[in-house]
Image (cartoon, rainbow, N blue to C red):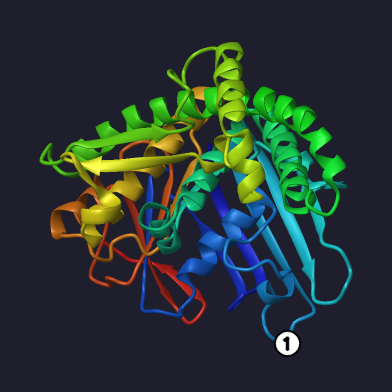
Amino acid sequence: MRILDLTLYNFRNYEALQCAFDPGINLFIGENAQGKTNLLEAVCYLSRGAAFRTRKEAELIRFGSEFAELEARVFSYDREQRMKAVLFAGRRPRQLFLSGVKKLTREALDGVLNTVLFCPEDLSVLKKGAAERRRLTDDALCQLRPRYAKALEEYRRCAAQKAAVLREWHDRPGLLDLLPEYNERMAQTGAIIIHSRAGYLRHLAAYASAHHAAFTGDSERLELNYQTVSTVADPAAPAERIYGWLREHQESHRQAEIAAGQCLSGPHKDDFELTINGLSVRTYGSQGQTRTAAISLKLAERDLFEQDTGEQPVLLLDDVLSELDAGRQDFVVNCIRSGQVLITCCETDRVTAAGRTFRVESGTVRPVED
């Protein structure tokens, strides 16, 4: 899967742009605020139907313009297709096209262009609370496993309703009669969630460890440990067995939940921990180590998408070289040898020998000649 070329009109700071991409590494260099990240955002929008820096589509339209157009020629699943999005400054809804045919829903474009994105904000996944790490896992699984997305949606709905019961039962004691039903559905869907997360994270860990070893010249060992409900003896066990363990945990925490007025049992508290040479990345990892680990996870995520779909997603790496030493920078720009990669960096003296280098300046993009 690769992008052949990208055309932009009135998108962010680009009045007009046409850029052909290399099938390998595409390195975009330039000072801050020149438009490097805007390129990745355009690709991401065509891929996912949403920008990664804003939820307001009006902010994607060049100041003073009434509309913006994004168009890309994409080669995937052995054929060329053209994707296009037109965004409007007013309340008029966007328009989406695939090979010249207008589509009514975003879902009609799913799978044409898959992307895996790294941006600096992703570093918080490894340094902050468990919610961000769950989001990272859930976002990937929801794309790969429709059954997982359905189970997660129902689990969240039941958890919210159970939480409301636990908050309000003092005023309405009869609400406690609803807890067995919510616990039953949360155990059923929670078992699917835990089993799926365990499988995904086990494979993610294997791929990420291999990438991290190559990244660091085998000087660092990256490991990932999944943490879930304490009664679940084996998260990789069949969902039917996990269901029983979840019911056991629910029963043992029933009175504690009623007393605390909150839901204390279930995979909504899941987490995973990354370690480098046995030490927690969250606690002891340097900025360079944290960034290297995050990039290794993204490379592993791309591997799992390829394993599942047969097509390797386009890898988007935004401001990826900051805080990496020279050897790790060289790995990123020269040693990712499979698939198409789009990289932005502020190191203006950098070039890649594994593709093409482009200089971005004031909304213009031009190739750097060898």
Where residue 334 appears, as percent x and y from the top left, is 25, 48
The answer to whether residue 24 is visible is yes
Q: Residue at x 56, y 12 (%)?
A: 241
Q: Residue at x 26, y 55 (%)?
A: 283
Q: Nearer the viewer, residue 54 or 87?
A: 54
Q: Which residue is tagged 1?
A: 64
Instruction: Judge from the rendering whether residue 25 lies leftward or rightward of residue 2; answer left or right.
Output: left
Q: Nearer the viewer, residue 4 or 315?
A: 315
User: In the displayed structure, would residue 233 be above or below residue 341?
Assistant: above
Q: Quadrant of the C terminus?
A: bottom left
Q: Nearer the viewer, residue 80 or 13?
A: 13
User: In the displayed structure, would residue 241 be above or below residue 144?
Assistant: above
Question: Which quadrant of the figure has residue 158?
Answer: top right
Instruction: Judge from the rendering whether residue 238 lies leftward or rightward of residue 126; answer left or right.
Output: right
Q: How many marks?
A: 1
Where residue 306 appears, as percent x and y from the top left, is 49, 28
User: In the displayed structure, would residue 347 be above or below residue 95?
Assistant: below
Q: Residue at x 46, y 33 (%)?
A: 228
Which structural element holds mark 1? Answer: loop
Instruction: Judge from the rendering whether residue 66 lies leftward or rightward of residue 234; answer left or right.
Output: right
Where residue 229 appears, as percent x and y from the top left, is 49, 31
